Image (cartoon, rainbow, N blue to C red):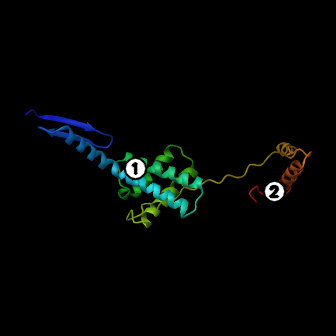
Amino acid sequence: KKFQKSIYKSKKCVIIYKQYSCNVFEKKVTILNCLYKSLRGKILMNAYIGEYTDYMRNTCHKSANTVESYKRDITQYITYLSELGISNIKRTTQTNVLSYIMLLQKMGRATSTVSRVIASIRSYYLYLLRNGQIDSDPTTTLTSPRIEKKPPQALTSNEVTLLLEQPKLSDNKGIRDKAMLELLYATGIRVSE
């Protein structure tokens, strides 16, 4: 019988067949098994993300924006891990997390963004640890970068004059707005107060 050597490539695996007489069905099953093994970890990690977002939404009562931001951060982190060939979250190390953070910094992400990503990843690993999905938390000694506090910008006297002249005093809303602006300006109170 004739010797054949076939190579099938997927994104994560390479199958080399040395066959004498192998039918097409057996080849397809072998390829599917290889794909399943390579994708199984990613599927599980994505399932954990779904459970984690449900936990954040229903148990922690986080806002929709916070849940979406954390989900996006974790999804990008999982994608990074899969690019490294890590298909099981249990196999991640502190080095993996640090290299991801360094990559974000090299990409020019803002310090506040990097801090949020660290908080997202830390929260995710804590969730996995509490639910028995991982044995140890690689983020325990991870520290967030210091966020630079910027002093508030003051308006010039011309800008203040223009601002105070904006409300139209012809109706009650205009009078209310003028009073609020005068109060803010006269007392130096912050808008949030």
Give the vertical position of 144 relative to 79 (above or below). below
Q: Where is residue 99 in the image (x, y as percent from the top left)?
A: 43, 51
Give the vertical position of 5 relative to 51 (above or below). above
Give the vertical position of 17 relative to 177 (above or below). above
Decide which of tag 1 and tag 2 comes sooner along the chain: 1
Between 109 and 3, the residue placed more toward the observer is: 3
In front of the other: label 1 or label 2? Answer: 1
Viewed as shown, does residue 73 lie left or right of 96? right
Judged from this view, the residue extending furthest toward the right is: 170
Q: Which residue is located at x 79 percent, y 46 percent?
A: 155
Q: Where is residue 1 in the image (x, y as percent from the top left)?
A: 7, 34
Viewed as shown, does residue 116 lie left or right of 17? right
Residue 32 sits in quarter: top left
Judged from this view, the residue extending furthest toward the top is: 2
Work out how far the residue at label 1 is from the one at label 2, CA to CA, in angstroms.
49 Å
Can the viewer see residue 84 in this picture?
yes
Q: Which residue is located at x 35 percent, y 52 percent?
A: 41
Between 97 and 7, the residue placed more toward the observer is: 7
Mark 1 highlights which residue?
A: 81
Q: Where is residue 51 in the image (x, y as percent from the top left)?
A: 46, 58
Q: Which amino acid does label 2 sit on?
A: Gly
Element type at marker 2? loop
Mark 2 highlights which residue?
A: 188
Q: Tell me if mark 1 has few (under 14), some (14-19) or many (20+) residues whose alpha carbon lies within 10 angstroms of its own.
A: many
Q: Tell me if mark 2 has few (under 14), some (14-19) or many (20+) residues whose alpha carbon lies within 10 angstroms of its own.
A: few
Image marks 1 and 2: residues in contact by CB distance under 8 Å: no
Q: What residue type is labelled 1?
A: Leu
Q: Residue 16 carries which label?
A: none
